[in-house]
Image (spheres, helix red, strand yellow):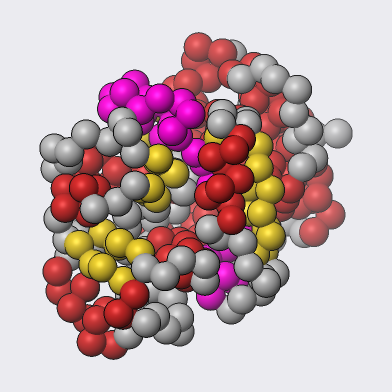
Amino acid sequence: MGGGSWATAIAKMVLGQEEEINWYMRRDDRIEDFKRMGHNPAYLTGVKFDIKRIHFYSNINDAVKASDTLVFATPSPYLKFHLKKLKTKIKEKFIVTAIKGIVPDENMIISDYFAQIYNVPSENIAVLAGPCHAEEVALERLSYLTIACTDIDKARIFAKKLSGFYIKTSVSDDVAGIEYGSVLKNVYAIAAGICSGLKYGDNFQAVLISNAVQEMKRFLDTVHPINRQVGDSVYLGDLLVTSYSNFSRNRTFGTMIGKGYSVKSAQIEMEMIAEGYYGTKCIKELNKHYHVNMPILDAVYNILYERISPTIEIKLLTDSFR
């Protein structure tokens, strides 16, 4: 469900194990170009597909009716738009969210949204998380994925549909923690980008990310208190790759802000969604109920939404670090 780079990467992984897939894309013209060219015309254009193994749909209801497992890989700001057209019940389907964001306005992680709005039972909801960039999947570079579901057997079954010589998988039952961590790492990647744009060096970046993982742990332990190791790759590894990689759109977005771009101009120039922009506001709103000490989140929020100078805000942040 979705036609972006991450959706394309997931399709590539699944087709390594399965004979056929159904693929929902909103635009008929994009589907026709895909069929004609043999690859996604807009994202990861180097990945070739056997079109005979793909059943394309531009009608979401037809796609859902034809499928047992639904993998959602649309940007979080557009999820409600797609689901608004949905008339088919999905509570009996196995839902996998590969969306690393929160539903705007609802301030809900995606798994909670499906559970509360569409009555999907928790054992039928899974989360797909990194550390993993779509671009490296396209290049078949060794990557690791974690699939989280309260029903571990279902998580293992889906993990096998992704595993391959360049994809290693593991499973977890920490659905909410992994989802919140996936949102927060985008926020911290924006912070890392802002600091890079301001010419802070590698020494400070190490201190920033060290503080970020502590901040993430405080938040996760508050909103979903279970026994977890934040040093595991699905939390810390995803945070590191999103904060440091040149493939990271959130880091790129932050770097532009640090260099003096306005939010609007940075978004226009990128032509891609930086999930952390929306995630920052959502977590800020959620934290009004939890009151977790989150100085990095607050700094990014002040820069993006209160239009406070990045130079001033990051200087205040540096003074709070040890």
Instruction: Report if residue 113 lies within the magenta region.
Output: yes
Looking at the rendering, in which quadrant would you find the N terminus?
Answer: bottom left
Query: Which residues, given as a range, are shown in magenta?
Result: 110-138
Q: Identify whether 218 is placed above or below 316.
A: above
| Corner quadrant of residue 221 | top right
Q: Identify whether 289 is placed above or below 46.
A: above
Answer whether residue 314 is visible to the viewer in this image: no
Q: Give x and y (percent) for residue 177.
A: 61, 30
Q: Give x and y (percent) for residue 236.
A: 73, 44
Of residues 79 and 299, the one nearer the viewer is: 79
Q: How many marks?
A: 0
- Residue lying farthest bottom? 37
Q: Residue at x 42, y 70 (%)?
A: 19
Q: Residue at x 75, y 35 (%)?
A: 230
Q: Identify whether 264 is placed above or below 36.
A: above
Of residues 278 and 99, the one nearer the viewer is: 99
Q: Residue at x 53, y 49 (%)?
A: 158
Q: Give x and y (percent) for residue 127.
A: 51, 41
| Corner quadrant of residue 144 | bottom right
Answer whether residue 29 is visible to the viewer in this image: yes
Tell me: 119 left or right of 222: left
Q: Residue at x 61, y 20 (%)?
A: 224
Q: Identify whether 142 is placed above or below 83.
A: below
Instruction: Report if residue 206 lies within the magenta region.
Output: no
Of residues 264 and 209, the one nearer the viewer is: 209
Q: Give x and y (percent) for residue 66.
A: 24, 53
Tell me: 11 left or right of 155: left
Looking at the rendering, in which quadrant would you find the C terminus?
Answer: top right
